Amino acid sequence: MADNKIESVLKEHRVFEPPRQFVEDAAIKPADVEALYSAAEADHEGFWADQARKHLDWHQDFSTTLDDTNAPFFKWFTDGKINVSYNCLDRHLSAKADKTAIIFEADDGNVEHISYADLHARVCRFANALKAQGLAKGDRAVIYLPNVPEATVAMLACARIGAIHSVVFGGFSAPSLRDRIDDAEAKMLITADGNYRGGKLIPLKEVADKALSEGCESIESVVVLKRSGADVEMRDGRDIWWHDVVDGQPADCEPEWVDAEHPLFILYTSGSTGKPKGIQHASAGYLLGAVTTCRWVFDLGDDDVFWCTADVGWITGHTYITYGPTACGATQVMFEGVPTYPEPDRFWKMVDTHQVTIFYTAPTAIRALMKHGDEYPQRHALDSLRVLGTVGEPINPEAWMWYRQVIGKERCPIVDTWWQTETGAHMITPIASYTPTTPGSVTHALPGIEADILDESGERVTDAGAGGVLVIKKPWPYMLRTIWGDPDRYKETYFGMYDAHTYVAGDSAQRDEKGYFRILGRIDDVVNVSGHRLGTMEVESALVAHEAVAEAAVVSRPHDVKGEAIVAFIILKDGEGDEQLASDLRNWVSEQLGAIAKPEEIRFADGLPKTRSGKIMRRLLRTVARGDEVTQDVSTLENPQILDQLQAKGT
Ligand code: 6R9
């Protein structure tokens, strides 16, 4: 099926021009885009310096644009001084104090409008509270909150005082939360008593307590938002309610002016080894990417209502909820719930209610909603929409066409945006008012981004249809700066394959006849389940931590809603596996890592296919998991008889 998918993308030749009316109404015209491309080509650094001065408010201007003397540890706008929360809030107050910044819709349908003046006051109060709790510039605070405005407030409050936040997605388990707190050596945890998603209670404080019960020695205080009203234990001297910490705090807080390179946040993401990587972003460069991409790619303007359906716990929520729309002074929708609750028309109903103009979601959501049938979107007019976006994984042409026809009514350009936690913001994507689009194609790199495809020896791959390694050949302002506490891993992972200026994304890609990029998938041991990155090693380590398991190998197979699903091959310490144990193991992984990592299928075997040097042959397992015929060379296999057994056990 994977091969079919690639083939159907390869045969895809449909091209859709940006609608004429859209271009006429757009803030950014094709001629403006052309000018950006030529400026970037003529002078990469000069281009980014101009953009940084145009889109950001500086407390002190910078004199060096790019310092690459210690490549790949690049620095941008080094001697400039800035505050990110000032750029997201204060600078809008003179003209837009009463403009709605956030339209928040809760899981139960309750709606709250928060103006820029109000958001500013909430951020200042919470920033003052953080300081009063002893959090200072450079300290880390882990945020483990639902997708509610307080998450944005907490992030911006950290930015205001120069503290470094690390948001952990609310679906992550206690051990995952603990690992992240320990790795970041966080001083404070900001969480909630719990919240409702899809009508179900998510017991955040309970999970947090479990995480804190072992390790997490760096944590001095825990701030708890009252959200669900659930009964929770508050530990004396450590836990304190959000409403109590902000009580009496002034609604003004002088921003801490930090160096452009001051770390803004750490966000953990899966890599090819068991330990998640703390991706570290810098203040000014990151914010610049958030602003330019909102303006260029989405054509985000003053009259728009922007809605990114991601959770703030992921990079998409960081850049396209907390930082991008606010830095642009835009109005955005923030949603606590799930697309199918109470009914599968929730998204479409919300688009009409809030008159959403730009809608940004993931292919997995599009595929899931498409399965429910056209009658749900057809209940709603959807006529406020003007741009549709997708992110997180490759989108199959069928889902792309459905999105275009049924949601966009053939009127809205679709921007299929390729980027990563590490890249900070969009990299390869159509520009809504400029780029003719093709289903399943991420089209071309943005101005100031030098994307290319290389073969293993570093030669450019230029032939249409030929695959290779996706690279970015020049540093860009919104790239990650390092892996928190592990600069060697940063260097090795992203710049180890070619040279210190060539960023290796970890994806393979190819070009079509037009020169457009298509993303084929990861080249490392990372799988993409419902748009979320998971390291197969992480899942394997969780499995072998179970008392019954001797060895585990995890691969993925295509899944028509999730994109990819996890299949785990298990060797038991003794005895034979049964359905009960399979179900226990699935739940075990969910407890260890979070529900997104739960294997779709567990297969028990007596051994794993290994090379004579002892390496598990994952390619072979992938073929078996997909139910495909094994055509690979198995002559190097140490234990060929295991293959028949694995295939026979297929369900
Ligand atoms: C933003 C985000 C990054 C990985 C990336 C790639 C996949 C993201 C994609 C896409 C095809 C797109 N990916 N966008 N693949 N088309 N439009 O998702 O960040 O969670 O770090 O994942 O997701 O494989 O390398 P992150």
Image (cartoon, rainbow, N blue to C red):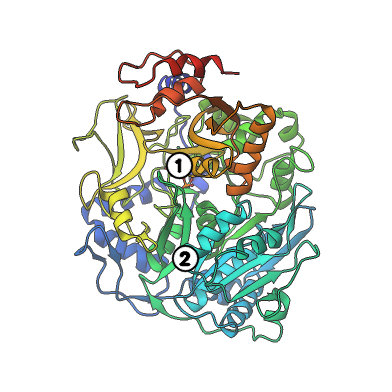
Q: Position of residue 548 (x, y in %)?
A: 58, 37
Q: Position of residue 565 (x, y in %)?
A: 55, 32
| Residue 126 in view here | yes
In the image, residue 327 above or below residue 356: below
Q: Residue at x 70, y 87 (%)?
A: 248
Q: Which residue is mark 2?
A: 184
Does label 1 point to a residue whose CB lies under 8 Å from ligand 1? no
Q: Position of residue 536 (x, y in %)?
A: 47, 39
In front: label 1 or label 2: 1
Q: Residue at x 35, y 62 (%)?
A: 51
Question: Which comes sooner in the sequence, label 1 or label 2?
Answer: 2
Quarter the C terminus occupies: top right
Quadrant of the image occupied by residue 329: bottom right
In the image, residue 318 above or below residue 572: below
Identify the secondary structure beneath mark 2. Answer: helix
Identify the secondary structure beneath mark 1. Answer: helix
User: What amino acid is labelled 1 in the image?
Assistant: Met
User: What amino acid is labelled 2 in the image?
Assistant: Ala
Q: Which residue is mark 1?
A: 537
Callout 2 crowding tier (Cα within 10 Å): few <14, some 14–19, many ≥20: many
In the image, residue 343 above or below residue 314: above
Q: Residue at x 62, y 70 (%)?
A: 116
